[in-house]
Image: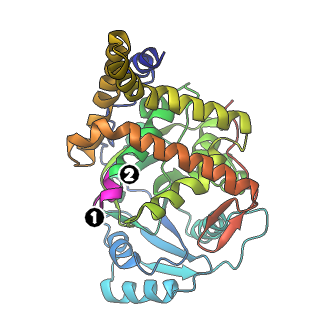
Amino acid sequence: MSLAAWLWLLLAQGMFWRTDVRLPPGRDPGAWPPVCVVVPARDEAAVLPRSLPSLLAQDYPGRAEVFLVDDGSSDGTAELARELARRHGGLPLTVDRPGEPPTDWTGKLWAVRHGIALARARDPEYLLLTDADIAHAPDSLRRLVAAADSGGFDLVSQMARLRVESGWERLVVPAFVYFFAQLYPFRRVGRAGARTAAAAGGCVLLRVGAAERARIPEAIRHAVIDDVALARAVKGGGGRIWLGLAESVDSVRPYPRLHDLWRMVSRSAYAQLRHNPLLLLGTVAGLVLVYLVPPAAVAAGLAGGDAAAVAAGAAAWLVMTGTYVPMLRYCRQPLWLAPLLPFTAALYLLMTVDSAVQHYRGRGAAWKGRTYARPETVPDER
């Protein structure tokens, strides 16, 4: 059963394992449309010096400006942003604070709402929604707009290249992107008429007209997994979307300890499962069957002299390992990590169970001093 599952994933799950879905080249639109960059930020003083100057230094031929929305920071985020703008110059920067979010909004989306409201006064054609820990190459905005304009896309999103330096980051981070692509194969996301919709919240270029039709962000104000909710709302409103891996958009946020990575995953894992115990049980069973059975079958077969179990388990493990290799190459990691994917999957299984436990303890999605005890999930695909 595990081998059959891996053959199906290899051949019928949108070639999720391939890493060649990159930002399509776009033509110079001639008259470059105005763009506003919206950056929600809560206690981001540690990463802003590496990320904000990269936005201010964008080499964009049209009119562009940056709006950083300080979501109740206590570490001087707003003051540091203004100082960085004075020091580095570049695109105009506006820093503002919306106050505490209402109970029916997540903090990030409340900040995004405020930033979009400020931006609309400038009458932009596009909004770049990017996180405070994301650093952009100087031509990032230009390439995003050119790709959206040439391809007729209403939403263009790139999954930022995540930091992979510590031992735990090497073990866990490439698998995070791999599992995401397995759930939302990038080729299907960009296919017209396909139900699959997703985005990577660190870098989303959004056409203002599409945002208005989809009622963004009001329509997704409860969403903890806001990037997927955003993409579904835009695609559900008839918009065209594209998602791929980034080449020059990087996350600078470190996750040096297992505890940091655990918290990142567990805070939203149960929301991904719509807080449904049956989906949780099915997910645990699926992870065991797909990722843990192959090495267990090899070990049991060797111990019991069962050649068939060894052969089937080894074949499934080999397919699993082969599909993981392209992601390790993309993340610039050693290929000997590929056979360790079952161990990493076991960690993700425990993180998912812990996410459910925290939810039923009333802690929900805790992040930077806020707890969403019963966060809303993304809307169902239609």
Residue 156 higher or lower than 62, as above or below = above
Q: Earlier in the sequence, mark 2 or mark 1?
A: 1
Q: Residues within 10 Å of mark 1 (few under 14, many from 20)?
A: some
Q: Secondary structure at mark 2?
A: helix
Is 169 colored magenta in this rendering?
yes
CA distance for labels 2 and 1:
25 Å
Residues at marks 2 and 1 touching, judged by CB atoms closer than 8 Å: no
Q: Nearer the viewer, residue 175 or 85?
A: 175
Residue 126, can we see it?
A: no
Q: Which residue is under mark 1?
A: 138
Q: Which mark is residue 173?
A: 2
- Front one among 215 and 169: 169
Q: Quadrant of residue 237?
A: top right
Horizontal and vertical percent position of residue 225: 60, 51
Q: Residues within 10 Å of mark 2 (few under 14, many from 20)?
A: many
Mark 1 residue element: loop
Amino acid residing under circle 2: Val
Residue 347 x, y percent position in the rendering = 47, 47
The magenta region covers 162-170
Query: Tag 1: residue type?
Result: Pro
